[in-house]
Image: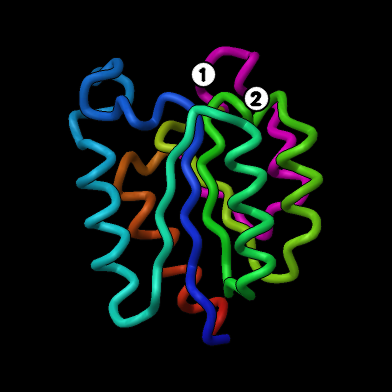
Amino acid sequence: MSGAIHVLNGPNLNRLGTREPEIYGATTLAEVEAMARAAAGSRALVFHQSNAEYQLIDWIHQAIDESACAIIINPAGLTFTSVPIMDALKMFPGPVIELHITNIHRREAVYHHSLVSKVATAVIAGLGPQGYRTAVEAACRMVG
């Protein structure tokens, strides 16, 4: 598949590097984006972050309309609450990788039930910011 990989980031991820560094680390979102682009090599990569649920949904629709080859999504707190994001991802015909910096299953119970996992092709959790590199490399392998 020749379309771009779309990497979508949800609420509060713009605060990476300063938000609870003991949990999320000191890597900034700009550094995460650079890491993802390096992992993509020559493959086009679209990278977005928003604190607004509707914007993430619009970007999923954009990925569909632009025939993206894969979506990597870290919906952050919306992972556990957003039926609309889950429904939008259901419409995407390619691989969807759900990504979390922390291992959500080792955290408080509120973080254990992902709606996105119900529609994701794969889930990566607990690798820290390096998980983005792993997710992009996996997406590249999945789409050939």
- Looking at the image, which residue is at 22% across and 28% down? 17
Residue type at the position of mark 1: Arg
Is residue 112 covered in magenta? yes
Inspect the image, locate mark 2, and give the three-letter code of the amino acid beneath it. Answer: His
Residue 48 percent across, percent down from the top left: 43, 48
Give the magenta range.
105-125
Q: Is residue 103 left or right of residue 97?
A: left
- Circle number at residue 130: none
**N-term-proximal mark, 2 vs 1:** 1
Q: Read off the residue under disc 2.
A: 112
* Residue 13 higher or lower than 48, as above or below: above
Q: Give the residue at x 39% y 75%.
A: 44
Q: Residues within 10 Å of mark 1 (few under 14, many from 20)?
A: few
Q: Is residue 126 magenta?
A: no
Q: Nearer the viewer, residue 10 or 22?
A: 10
Q: Is residue 144 above or below residue 91?
A: below
Q: Quadrant of residue 86?
A: top right
Residue linked to disc 1: 107
Tell me the residue at 74%/35% (across/down). Answer: 115
Determine the CA span between mark 2 and mark 1: 8 Å
Left or right of 82 in this view: 34: left
- In the rendered image, the vertical position of residue 107 relative to residue 32, given as above or below: above
